[in-house]
Image (cartoon, rainbow, N blue to C red):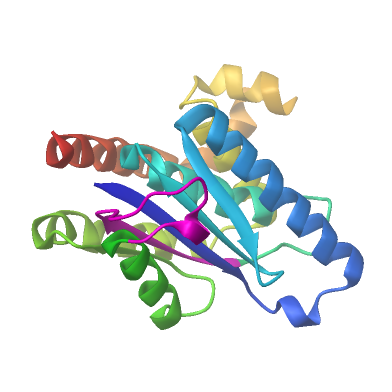
Amino acid sequence: MIGVLTGDIVDSTKMSPADHQATIEMFKYSIQYFTQHFAASGEIYRGDSVQISFKQPQYAMKSAVLLKMFLLQSKETSKPIVVTLALGLGEASVLGATPGVSQGSAFIYSGRGLDNASRGDLTLHAESSQLQEKLGLATKFLNHLLSSLTRKQAKVLYYYVLLNYPTHQKLADRLQTSQQNVTKHLSRIGASLVEEYLLFFEQQIIQGNG
């Protein structure tokens, strides 16, 4: 089993050239990070879309959250960047150097999922009905939570996940703010629930891939 994450920028045609270029650079940075840390491979296509495949699919949803929060919190653009993401879990009949030359059910589920997703949503589409049953509803709750975050909250959650759920003091030091401020934001975000979900996701994928 592999994971395939496909995404589109919302309202990309309405973006200024500077915002569009900054978003593409963020896509490139994210692909590079996921490649280095999660053995992924990815590419940008059509000028406003991205597709990333994960040979270690347990890290695909964590990457999806990181990508969504990275774009939302960035100050490189004049306004927050919203992206629609669909994660497909399935097999790869052909796994090339990039997703564009790969084939398999994971790619089909991810692509179809993106076509049917509401703008700005994060959705999950698993070939295994058992995995879909275990993770589908929880993913809908995750999407609802992420869709309501402000730019500042997205930044706090981004670094909380990026740094593998550090103590509030360590996160405060990274963000150069007070522990009380970080605790307040994490509580309002529901960050502990995001952490529980991502750890549960990893566990279920490892068990299903074992």
Residue drawn at (63%, 33%) of the image: 181
Above or below: residue 109 compared with residue 58:
below
Quarter of the view holding residue 173: top right
Q: Quadrant of the C terminus?
A: top left
Front residue of 132 and 101: 101
Quarter of the view holding residue 198: top left
Asked if residue 108 lies in the magenta stretch, the reply is no
> Which residues are drawn in magenta?
83-103
- Residue 196 x, y percent position in the rendering: 30, 38
Judge left or right: residue 189 versus residue 47. Answer: left
Q: Is residue 177 visible?
A: no
- Residue 207 x, y percent position in the rendering: 13, 36
Judge left or right: residue 19 versus residue 73. Answer: right
Residue drawn at (66%, 56%) of the image: 72
Residue drawn at (69%, 42%) of the image: 29
Above or below: residue 35 compared with residue 88:
above
